[in-house]
Amino acid sequence: MTKSFRLLLMLSALAVPSIAMAGGGGLGGIAGATFPEQIIQESTSVSQLAQQAQQVRNSLQQLVYQAQNLKSLPQNLWNQAYGDLNQLTNIASQSNGLSYAMQNVNGAFQSEYPSYQPGQNYDQQYQQWNTTTSNSIAAALQQQGLQTSNFATQQQALAAINAASQSATGRMQVLQAGNQIAAMQVTQLQQLGQIESANSDAQLAYLKQQTAEKSASDAAETQAYQSWTSGSVVTPSGQGYGQFSNP
């Protein structure tokens, strides 16, 4: 059973209260999404990005093997590599934005439910994920003799890849770096999915508890009202009350 389908079943069964995202405009580019919807969409996004990263990794790895037997990377192979590298920069950018969106949603949840106390600091885990990912990308670039400052943004990365394509050495450098980054990105996205899964499970468990407590309270109020209207309500002393008093 997929994570998204499991969440849908839980949310349908619980009828949990919805949290509108701050400002009514949603977070992380998911406009107007409520908290349960946000969880499902984030879980799906992480899974999709991980699959895309794996596909790019497989393609780049194959290109690296082919290039090792050649003195230079032919134009047809470079065109394929450039497409993969372009997609990789997009995956990295989306992954970074998604992790920050998860932090925002986590903060919105804790603001809505101040009594919620998770067993782990998920904000810290998201921040650590960002730091580790950024450091790993920088290490892969430096290992291939590339300047990390030229890859600070997605636009700068694409410009640097274009510049590198002007020489055989440059092509091999960005190809090797891209292959390493793609492998790292797969691992990191899997880890991000695990953090998101644990975080959302804790939040949904809290909502389930809140829903159960409210249902019990509502049932008690309903029973008390029915007892009152039926004339069977008694005072602590055992005597009838008001017009329903027994003679």
Image (cartoon, rainbow, N blue to C red):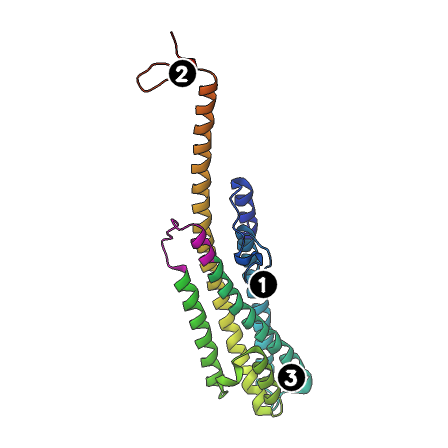
- Above or below 246: residue 149: below
Q: Amino acid at mark 2?
A: Gly
Residue on which the image places disc 3: 78
Q: In front of the other: label 3 or label 2? A: 2
Q: Earlier in the sequence, mark 3 or mark 2?
A: 3
Q: Residues within 10 Å of mark 2 (few under 14, many from 20)?
A: few
Q: Are marks 1 and 2 in contact (CB under 8 Å)?
A: no
Magenta residues (range): 106-122
Q: How many numbered marks, from 0 up?
A: 3
Q: Earlier in the sequence, mark 1 or mark 2?
A: 1
Q: Amino acid at mark 3?
A: Trp
Where residue 123 sits: x, y (%)?
A: 41, 62
In the displayed orientation, state which residue is furthest to the right.
76
Q: Amino acid at mark 1?
A: Gly
Q: Earlier in the sequence, mark 3 or mark 1?
A: 1
Residue on which the image places disc 1: 29
User: From where the camera sits, is residue 2 visible?
Assistant: no
Q: Are marks 3 and 2 in contact (CB under 8 Å)?
A: no
- Above or below 78: residue 231: above
Q: CA distance from mark 3 to mark 1?
A: 33 Å
Q: In front of the other: label 1 or label 2? A: 2
Where residue 82 sits: x, y (%)?
A: 63, 80
